[in-house]
Amino acid sequence: RGGMGVVYRAREPRLQTDVAIKVVLGALTPDARARFEREARACAQLRHPNLVRVVALGEEQGHPLLVMDYVAGES
């Protein structure tokens, strides 16, 4: 749990890999939501060994979320 939301560890069944799902829990204004989605799309384009890869952008029960590669340990 962080300042904006919570991160879950999950299993991607088709690829058989672990992922991290970051769910934003607070209410976002339309502008903040658009910024979140814009930044997520930008992050998804980045490739570097020291960056966690964003693999999907979604929504669950009205809450925006990011699906990222799972990295063990603390951030």
Image: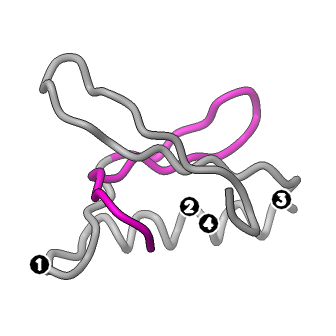
**Amino acid tagged 1:** Pro
Q: Which mark is residue 28?
A: 3
Name the main secondary structure of what is drawn in magenta.
strand
**Amino acid tagged 4:** Phe
Query: Which residues, given as a range, are shown in magenta?
Result: 56-75
- How far apart are the alpha carbons under marks 4 and 3? 9 Å
**Amino acid tagged 3:** Leu
**At which x and y percent is residue 15?**
12, 26
Q: Residue at x 52, y 41 (%)?
A: 8
Q: Residue at x 27, y 52 (%)?
A: 69
Marks 3 and 2: in contact by CB < 8 Å? no
Mark closest to the chain's N terminus, 1 or 2:
2
Q: Which mark is residue 20?
A: none
Mark closest to the chain's N terminus, 1 or 3:
3
Marks 3 and 1: in contact by CB < 8 Å? no
Residue that label 4 marks:
36
Which of these two is toward me, 21 or 55?
Answer: 21
Residue that label 1 marks:
49
Depth check, mark 1 against mark 3: the one in front is 1
Q: Residue at x 27, y 26 (%)?
A: 12
Q: Secondary structure at mark 1?
A: loop
